[in-house]
Image (cartoon, grey):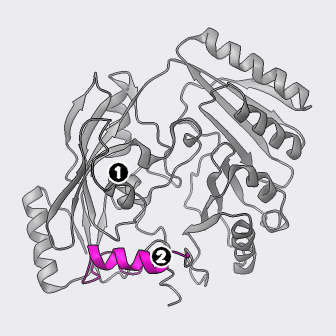
C-alpha cells in the first residue's frame, strides 16, 4: 500500500508509528521506478513524497535552490529555465523523469558528468527523516560549506536504504545559450584515440557519448555549449580537425539542449543495465565478445565519464548478461541491473569488498532494518 502524506507533520507521525510497530516500509518519490533494482516485498508499505513538492528558497543570484524532495525533476528544470538557469543532471531512462529526491536516492549520472561531475556533486544541503521519525540535516545553503561529515554523499545512491530524503539544496548553472553537436563515425580504436585527445586538450565539451546498437554501429556525439555562437564554432572547428587526423567522419548536428539524448526509451525495456567503469576501459568493453553477443541491445555510454546504460525490449539469456557483468568487473567497473525480466536469476547488484562496512552503516541508521528491505547497494540480498 502506498501512503502520500500532505504535510511534514503527517509524514513524521506516520514514520514514528511504523517505527514503534517495527513495520517495514520503503521511501519513494513519485513511485515511477519502484520496479528498478532488487524487488521490494509488495506487502510492505511505500511512503511517497509526491505531495511534498514545494520550492522552499531560490537564491537566483547565488545559483542555489532549496526544494522538497517530491518536486518532479521536469518541473524543477522548467522553473529554473525561466530564470536562465538549470540543474546539470541527466534524465533517468525508461520514461517519466521522476522526482529530484528519487534521482538523488539512486545517485545515477550520465554524460553530463563529463563537465559537471555527478548528481552528488550538485548537492550542498540535505534534509532527511530517519527510520525512527527524527529529522536531521547536513550541509547548508551556501556553496562553500565543508563542516562535518559529508552525509549528503552517503545518502546519494543509497536507494532509500538509510533514510527518507525530504529536502535538498542544490547548486545550479547558468544556461549557456549557444549549442552545437558533432557526430563521429569510424574505426572504434580511432574513436577511442579521439576521445583521449579531447580529454587531454583545452576543449570543454558539455558531454561526449558513445551510442548505438553494436558491434559495428558505434557513433560518438560531442556536445559543445558556450555563451556565444562564435565560441561554439571555434570548438567545433577544432574537433573536426582532430577527427580528420583520426580518419573519422564528422557531421554537425543542431543541439538546442544538452539534456537531450539521441536515443530515447519509449517502451518499458525488458532489460535495463547501468555500467560504471574507468573511461579508458570503456572502448575495451565495446569491442568485447560479451557485449557483442547481446543482440538487439541499445547502448548510450558516456565516453568521457565512463558510465551509461544499455537496454533491450526482448529477453536475453541470463548467461549472456552474466558474462557482460564478469567482463565489466574484470575491467575495473560495476554493472547494476535496473530492470530484468521475470524469472531472471541474476542479482541486481553483487557483494562489494566493503560489504561489512555497508552493513554496519545500515544498522546504525536503521537498527530495526525497516527501510527498503532487500535493497542495500553493495550487498547481494537476493541470493542470501
Mark 2, secondary structure of its residue: loop
Q: Residue 274: which quarter of the image? A: bottom right
Q: Residue at x 67, y 25 (%)?
A: 203
Instruction: Residue 38: give its label.
Output: 2
Residue designated by label 1: 99
CB contact under 8 Å: marks 1 and 2: no
First to last magenta residue range: 352-374
Distance between the Cα atoms at labels 1 and 2? 20 Å
The x, y position of residue 325, in whole percent, is: 69, 71
Q: Nearer the viewer, residue 223 or 379?
A: 379
Q: Is residue 354 magenta?
A: yes
The x, y position of residue 369, in whole percent, is: 29, 82
Mark 1, secondary structure of its residue: loop
Image quarter where the N terminus lies is bottom left
Residue 375: in sight, yes or no?
Answer: no
The answer to whether residue 45 is left or right of residue 36 is left
Amino acid at each position: 500500500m502506498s501512503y502520500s502524506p500532505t504535510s511534514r507533520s503527517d509524514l513524521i507521525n506516520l514514520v514514528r508509528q511504523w517505527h514503534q510497530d517495527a513495520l517495514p516500509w520503503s521511501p519513494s518519490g513519485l513511485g515511477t521506478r519502484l520496479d528498478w533494482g532488487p524487488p521490494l516485498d509488495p506487502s510492505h508499505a511505500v511512503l511517497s513524497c509526491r505531495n511534498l513538492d514545494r520550492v522552499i528558497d531560490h537564491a537566483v543570484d547565488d545559483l542555489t535552490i532549496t526544494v522538497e524532495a517530491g518536486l518532479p525533476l521536469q518541473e524543477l528544470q522548467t522553473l529554473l529555465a525561466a530564470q536562465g538557469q538549470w540543474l546539470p543532471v541527466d534524465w533517468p531512462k525508461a520514461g517519466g523523469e521522476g522526482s529530484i529526491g528519487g534521482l538523488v536516492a539512486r545517485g545515477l549520472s550520465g554524460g553530463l558528468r563529463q563537465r559537471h561531475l555527478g548528481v552528488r556533486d550538485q548537492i550542498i544541503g540535505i534534509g532527511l527523516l530517519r527510520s525512527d521519525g527524527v529529522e536531521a540535516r547536513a550541509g547548508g545553503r551556501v556553496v562553500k560549506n565543508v563542516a562535518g561529515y559529508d552525509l549528503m554523499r552517503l545518502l546519494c545512491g543509497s536507494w532509500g536504504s538509510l533514510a527518507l530524503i525530504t529536502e535538498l539544496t542544490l547548486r545550479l548553472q547558468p544556461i549557456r545559450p549557444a549549442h552545437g553537436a558533432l557526430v563521429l563515425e569510424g574505426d572504434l580504436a580511432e574513436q577511442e584515440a579521439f576521445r583521449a585527445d579531447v580529454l587531454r586538450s583545452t576543449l570543454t565539451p558539455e558531454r561526449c557519448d558513445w551510442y548505438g546498437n553494436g558491434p559495428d554501429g558505434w557513433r560518438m556525439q560531442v556536445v559543445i555549449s558556450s555563451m556565444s555562437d562564435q565560441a561554439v564554432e571555434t570548438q567545433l572547428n577544432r574537433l573536426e580537425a582532430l577527427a580528420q587526423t583520426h580518419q573519422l567522419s564528422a557531421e554537425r548536428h543542431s543541439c538546442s539542449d544538452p539534456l537531450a539524448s539521441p536515443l530515447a526509451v519509449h517502451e518499458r525495456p525488458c532489460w535495463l543495465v547501468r555500467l560504471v567503469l574507468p573511461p579508458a576501459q570503456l572502448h575495451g568493453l565495446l569491442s568485447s565478445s560479451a557485449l557483442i553477443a547481446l543482440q538487439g541491445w541499445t547502448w548510450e555510454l558516456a565516453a568521457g565519464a565512463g558510465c551509461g546504460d544499455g537496454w533491450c525490449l526482448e529477453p536475453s539469456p541470463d548467461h549472456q548478461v552474466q558474462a557482460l557483468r564478469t567482463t565489466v568487473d574484470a575491467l575495473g567497473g560495476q554493472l547494476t541491473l535496473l530492470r530484468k525480466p521475470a524469472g531472471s536469476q541474476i542479482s541486481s547488484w553483487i557483494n562489494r569488498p566493503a560489504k561489512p562496512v555497508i552493513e554496519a552503516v545500515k544498522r546504525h541508521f536503521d537498527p530495526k532494518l525497516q527501510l527498503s528491505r532487500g535493497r542495500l547497494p553493495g550487498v547481494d540480498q537476493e541470493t542470501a
